[in-house]
Structure formats: structure tokens, C-alpha cells
Image (cartoon, rainbow, N blue to C red):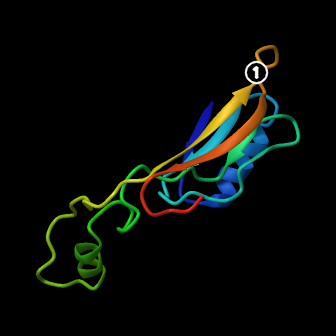
Amino acid sequence: MVDFHGEITSEKMAIGHFFDGSSTGVVGTHTHVPTADTRILEKGTAYQTDIGMCGDYNSVIGMNKENSVKKFLKSKDTIKHFPAEGEATLSGIIIEADHETGLAKKITRLIEGGNLIK
């Protein structure tokens, strides 16, 4: 498995194609928002540009949204980031792999709880 922790989707896609056929899966992390491009690449590697975060999506990447807005607006009463406290969502993927080749047979997006709709 390759976890590519990066900001740019094109970099994550390039790494996915680079490892296609030599890794069971390539998943992106960092942007906290699950992408809808879950698939198995041509040579058998499971791929998703970003698997999302585990946390409250009624937030700004898991942080309290009111305070985050104040930070972006450079408000003087902003305090240090702190986590949102709403219902959490578990985001990720499940990969079923071939035991002989190590390549992916199936990939399924996992979104449970919270306020995201699968």
C-alpha cells in the first residue's frame, strides 16, 4: 500500500499510475475531503485521489468552523485552532486483494456516520 500525503491531485494521480501493477493500492491523504474517483487502475492497483478524514465534516477540515472563518478573515478575537465537536464521519476504503498477485480485485469507498452521503 502506498499512502501519498500531498496537496495536488495531479501528483497523486501520477504516483497512482507510477505504482500501477506493483502495489495493491495507492491512496491520497491530506486534503481531508474524499474524492469520487475510486477505481482499479489498468494494471490492477486500487486507487483513490483522497480518502478523506475521520472527523466532523460540519467543520473546516475537522476544526471549529466559526473560529476557522475568523482566522481567514484575520479577526482579532481568533484563538488557536480547536477541533469541531459534532458527529464524526469515518472515511476510507476497503480493498479486496488477490492473494497470489497482491493486486486489487475490488475497492469500495467507506463513508460511515456523520453528515456525508455515500
Disc 1: which residue: 102
Q: Position of residue 77 (x, y in %)?
A: 11, 80
Q: Element at badge 1?
A: loop
Quarter residue 64 falls in: bottom left
Image height of 2 relative to 35, above or below: above
Q: Where is residue 1 drawn, in percent x and y?
A: 63, 30
Q: Is residue 70 left or right of residue 28?
A: left
Q: Residue at x 81, y 14 (%)?
A: 100
Residue 108: name its quadrant: top right
Residue 98 seen anywhere in this rendered image of the structure: yes
Q: Residue furthest right?
A: 42
Picture coordinates of residue 35 (x, y %)? 62, 59
Instruction: Please determine whether, in this image, residue 73 is positioned above or below residue 49.
Output: below
| Horizontal and vertical percent position of residue 15 | 70, 44
Question: In terms of depth relative to the viewer, which is nearer, 44 or 16?
Answer: 44
Residue shown at the point (77%, 31%) measured from the top left: 104
Q: Amino acid at mark 1?
A: Gly
Relative side of 100 to 68, left or right: right
The residue located at (45%, 63%) in the rendering is 115
Instruction: Name which residue lies at 71% across and 29% down.
Output: 96
